[in-house]
Each structure stands twice: as C-alpha cells, then as structure tokens.
C-alpha cells in the first residue's frame, strides 16, 4: 500500500484551517469575496475554509492540471475553462499545494485579464522548493519538505484523495518520493 505515514493529522488540519479562516475573515470583512477553488485537489480545504470563514462568498471552481504521476510538467491545462465574473471583485484563489508555482502563476495571469479588484492566494501546503515561477501565497496552512504527499484532497493519479489526513506517498517497495518538482 503506497499510503505512508501521516505527515499532518486530520485534527491538526482542522485547527490550522480554522485559524486561516479567521485570518481571511479579518482581512476581508465585511466585503463579499469571490472564492475560486482549484479542483480537484482543494476540495476538502475549500469546503472547510468556506464553512469556517464568516464572510459572504461566491464560489467558483476551475479544473487545472499540471502533474503527471509525481512530476510537475511545468505546463498547465484547463485555463480555457475559467468561468465566473471577476471584474471589480475581490478574489481569493484556493489551492491544495504550492510546488513549482506553475499552476498559480498561469492562473494569476489569466485572472488579471478579467480585471479583478484584488487577488489573494490561499494554499493548504507549500513545499520547500526553489519555485520555477515567482508566486507567493498570502495564506499558507503548512510548509512541508520537498516530498510527494497524498490525502485530504491530494492525489496520486486520481487516487487517495479521500484520506482524512495528509500522508507521505511511498511507491511499492520504495521509500517516500523526493524532489518531485525539479
Ligand atoms: P505546481 O504547478 O508545480 O505549483 O503544482 C501545483 C499542483 O501540483 C497542485 O495543485 C497539485 O495538484 C499538484 N501537486 C504538487 N505537489 C503535489 C503532491 O505532493 N501531491 C499531490 N499533488 C501535488
Ligand atoms: Mg491541483
């Protein structure tokens, strides 16, 4: 079974996401926020954040992909599907993990063309890697080492998203996967 040891437990996730939700609420209250969730990875983080933020929000989602297996391809698919009215609005982009930065960089450029009033980025996880694209998240749940992780929305080839905690990914017969973004 490639599900390795727990890196972040469901209990710790819940506590930290509640803190982030409070911080985002404080920074935006009382204004309406368009929350753009990147699917499928952010699904649990997004729904927990939304229910714990005390703000009027409009939910949009967009399905983007940049990974094959445990490797970032540096290319991003799905931006042509970006829908929603962002003009003049405050937007919060929500993603599961910031790795090479390619996904959020491409999305930020695509959003800028829609003339939002402001764009902030919230990620549950941020890998300690040299980013290929110059992107910084405004809200970060946890900094993690440069290793591949699964669970709580994060997948390996579509699998393991359902796990309530975040686990290290271990291919059969090997140790954890390292250095996947380079
Ligand atoms: P980036 O474009 O390289 O920053 O990669 C971001 C996207 O790659 C995330 O939204 C995830 O979908 C995927 N990703 C990066 N690292 C991991 C990981 O460790 N586990 C699962 N998905 C990952
Ligand atoms: Mg993703």
Image (cartoon, grey):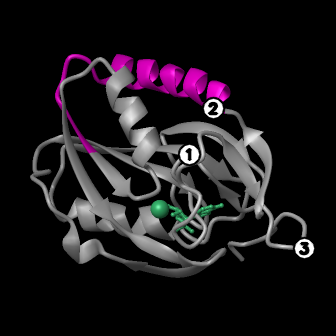
Q: Can see residue 146? A: no
CA distance separating discs 1 and 2: 8 Å
Q: Can see residue 42? A: yes
Segment tinted magenta in the rendering: 10-35
CA distance separating discs 3 and 1: 24 Å
Q: Position of residue 178 (x, y in %)?
A: 81, 68
Per the image, is 17 magenta? yes
Residue at (64% x, 25% y) in the render: 11
Residue at (76% x, 43% y) in the render: 7
Q: Dots 3 and 1: beta carbons under 8 Å?
A: no
Can you identify the residue that label 1 sits on? 152
- SS at mark 1? loop
Q: Which numbered dot is residue 10? A: 2
Horizontal side of residue 133 vs 113, given as left or right: right
Q: Dots 1 and 2: beta carbons under 8 Å?
A: yes
Q: Which-is-in-front pick, marks 3 and 1?
A: 3
């Amino acid at each position: 079974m490639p599900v390795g040891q727990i890196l972040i437990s469901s209990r710790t996730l819940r506590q930290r996401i509640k803190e982030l939700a409070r911080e985002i609420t404080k920074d935006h209250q009382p204004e309406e926020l368009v929350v753009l969730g990147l699917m499928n990875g952010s699904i649990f983080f997004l729904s927990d954040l939304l229910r714990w933020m005390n703000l009027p929000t409009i939910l949009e989602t967009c399905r983007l992909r940049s990974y094959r297996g445990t490797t970032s391809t540096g290319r991003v698919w799905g931006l042509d599907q970006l829908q929603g009215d962002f003009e003049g609005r405050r937007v919060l982009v929500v993603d599961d993990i910031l790795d090479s930065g390619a996904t959020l960089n491409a999305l930020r450029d695509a959003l800028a063309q829609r003339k939002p009033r402001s764009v902030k980025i919230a990620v549950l996880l941020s890998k300690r890697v040299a980013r290929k694209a110059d992107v910084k998240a405004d809200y970060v749940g946890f900094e993690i080492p440069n290793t591949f992780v699964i669970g709580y929305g994060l997948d390996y080839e579509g699998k393991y998203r359902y796990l309530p905690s975040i686990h290290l990914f271990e291919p059969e017969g090997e140790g954890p996967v390292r250095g996947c973004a380079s």
